[in-house]
Amino acid sequence: MESCQASMKFIVDDPLHESEKPYLLYRPENEGGVRTNILFYYQDVPARNARGFEGQFSLAKHGFQWMSRPSSVRALPTTEQYIHDMLAESMKIIEKELPADKVIGYDCRLRRNVSASQILGDCRNRTTPVTSALEAHVDQTPDGAWRRVMRHLRDDEAELMAAGSWRVRIVNLWRPLYHPVVDSALAVCDFNTVSPSDLVATDHVNSDYHSEIYYMKYNREQQWYWLREQTPDEVLMFITFDSDSGSDAKYCPHVAFQDPTTTNNGPIRESIEVRAMIFNESNDGF
């Protein structure tokens, strides 16, 4: 398997965080913009190209897998119709791969690899792209995941969750738009190579929601992979949370990076990701 030295962004191991929890506070520009107590740095990391070896990875064992799933959605990506159709199509892919009693698609997000200042429009609008995620992270901590789950359930469903009657997983389905990725590729880390001490719980706070994610500290034992020139017909599915204590992979760190094996003159990466909750019955059900 060929590899390259990839420059990836990690959180600084700051003594401040022993007494003050890391946070990112998102505020409007006229109120001071983003406020944080976090610093990041770039680290050269060996990244392995999974092209030709896609079948060796699985969601259950490694926390991620690639699949060939051409899209039939034809609406323009900047329209609500596209978001609706892509969400529906992605739900079918997820339900086929992970049979479930209930699936909730709770987020659909366009991304474009440009600076935040070049993003025009309200980023709370699903048709407005956001920038690539340049810091190595996991989308949910366990506490953040349960908070997210409860936000989308009825009261009676939440009671079943609290009683431990259901297994819940949160997954992300990611694919490029328009062309193969030659700019800002997405790398994923094998769950089995991550130490709990690599994970730094961080509050993300905005005007309408308080989430908790993990940022990553670098560890040379981590094994990072990407699919070189991933095409729009290829999807990457990765897990961000699993409530089953007996499961193998429970989360998947990931990060955007500049693929040094491709030309710098290629088109800007544009992509779409769908996030979903998968519920499986243990005893009683919804």
Image (cartoon, rainbow, N blue to C red):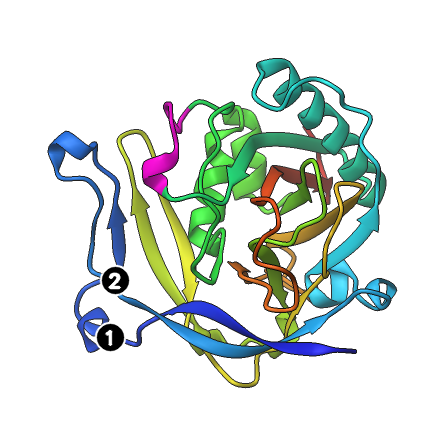
Along the polypeptide, which appears first: circle 1 or circle 2?
1
Q: Secondary structure at mark 2?
A: loop
Task: Choose top left, top right, bottom left or bottom right for residue 271.
Answer: top right
Q: Check disc 1 and report the residue beneath it.
A: 14
Q: Check disc 2 and report the residue beneath it.
A: 38
Query: In the image, is residue 7 above or below residue 206?
Result: below
Percent position of residue 233, x then y: 80, 41
Percent position of residue 279, x then y: 68, 39
Query: Does the magenta-highlighted stretch encompass residue 27?
Result: no
Name the one closer to the observer, 21 or 285.
Answer: 21
Magenta region: 116-124
Q: Quick one: quadrant of the N terminus?
A: bottom right
Please name the residue shown 63% across and 63% down the image.
245
Three-letter residue code for mark 2:
Ile
Percent position of residue 210, x then y: 33, 40
Three-letter residue code for mark 1:
Asp
Please name the residue shown 13% across and 30% down the image.
30
Percent position of residue 112, x then y: 51, 39
Relative placement, left or right, of 40 versus 257 is left
Q: Secondary structure at mark 1?
A: loop
Can residue 181 be seen here?
yes
Residue lying farthest to the front in this orientation:
265
Crowding around mark 2 (Cα neighbors within 10 Å: few <14, some 14 to 19, many 20+) is some
